[in-house]
Image (tube, coloured by chain):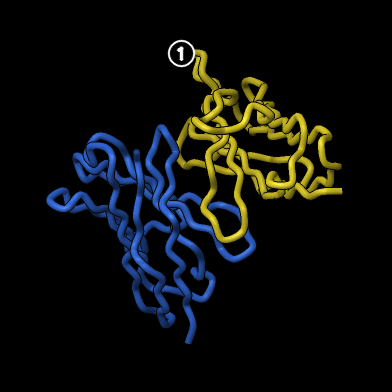
């Protein structure tokens, strides 16, 4: 199974500042034939299902604000919130869908400093 | 747009079974795999398995093999996940997730308590 490890576990950032979350996979999630990273990022607020933010590591889902961006390839990935807003307080998860079983990072809790 | 609507919350006793349904709309049901993921209270996300609604083929996580059954009824475009021999640590929110665009159902809380 591919193990997904996020860092940090929690993060406190001032409003308007940058938040950065890292995700490392134990094996590559880059499919070489199409050069796509099978890596997604989600935002989850209490009592709600996870909401897809990014897929293919860096493609924003429809309606996701452009302050959310993703980067990385292979085994190392980053989610960046360029200017933290109050509504961004949530837990963020990375997810590999390269192979079964799907696996997820343990989550990173983002709060306002 | 694509939506997945799940059945309502359940309370079950240990050793019982629970069956959760997931009814999609906005696309052809048999064209995309459906996955099941659960989340225990305050915990992370755990993949349980998938079903191919076209063929009925399934694959489950090793942890749940022998306890989870994923089925579908193509006449009513509904997917099901049944978990048997419930234990207290099966208390969780269970989600169905459509592959490729990663649309999630609203979740079904299953509480296992004597």
The residue lying toward the viewer, choosing from B30 and A80, is: A80
Residue A98 % position (x, y): 49, 30
Residue A90 % position (x, y): 68, 49
Could you say which quadrant of the image residue B27 lies in? top left
Please give the name of the residue rendered at 42% of the width and 42% of the height, measured from the top-left corner.
Answer: B103
The residue lying toward the viewer, choosing from A85 and A89, is: A85
Which chain is blue in the picture?
B
Q: Is residue B87 above or below residue A73?
A: below
Please give the name of the residue rendered at 38% of the width and 50% of the height, measured from the top-left corner.
Answer: B60
Q: Is residue B15 above or below residue A40?
A: below
Q: Is residue B56 above or below residue B7?
A: above
Colour for chain A in the figure: yellow
Residue B56 % position (x, y): 21, 45
Residue A59 % position (x, y): 55, 23
Letter of the chain that mark 1 sits on in the rendering: A
Residue for badge 1: A34
| Quadrant including the N terminus of chain B | top left
Residue density around tag 1, few if under 14, some if 14–19, many if 20 or more, within 10 Å:
few
Q: Say whether residue B5 is left or right of residue A6.
A: left
Q: Say whether residue A73 is left or right of residue A110.
A: left
């Amino acid at each position: 199974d591919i193990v997904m490890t996020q860092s940090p576990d929690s993060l406190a950032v001032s409003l308007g500042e940058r938040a950065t979350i890292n995700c490392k996979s134990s094996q590559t999630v880059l499919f070489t034939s199409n050069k796509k990273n099978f890596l997604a990022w989600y935002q989850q607020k209490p009592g709600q299902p996870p909401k897809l933010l990014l897929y293919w590591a860096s493609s924003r889902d429809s309606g996701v604000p452009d302050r959310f961006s993703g980067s990385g390839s292979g085994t190392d990935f980053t989610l960046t919130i360029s200017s933290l807003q109050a509504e961004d307080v949530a837990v963020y998860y990375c997810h590999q869908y390269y192979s079964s079983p799907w696996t997820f990072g343990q989550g990173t809790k983002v709060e306002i400093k | 747009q694509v939506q997945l609507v799940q059945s309502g919350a359940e309370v079950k006793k240990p050793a019982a079974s629970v069956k959760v349904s997931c009814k999609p709309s906005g696309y052809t049901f048999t064209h995309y795999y459906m996955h099941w993921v659960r989340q225990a209270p305050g915990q992370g996300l755990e993949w349980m398995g998938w079903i191919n609604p076209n063929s009925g083929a399934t694959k489950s996580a090793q942890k749940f093999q022998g306890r989870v059954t994923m089925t579908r009824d193509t006449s009513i475009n509904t997917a099901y996940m049944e978990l048997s021999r419930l234990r207290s640590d099966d208390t969780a929110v269970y989600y169905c997730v459509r592959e490729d665009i990663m649309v999630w159902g609203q979740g079904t809380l299953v509480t296992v308590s004597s």
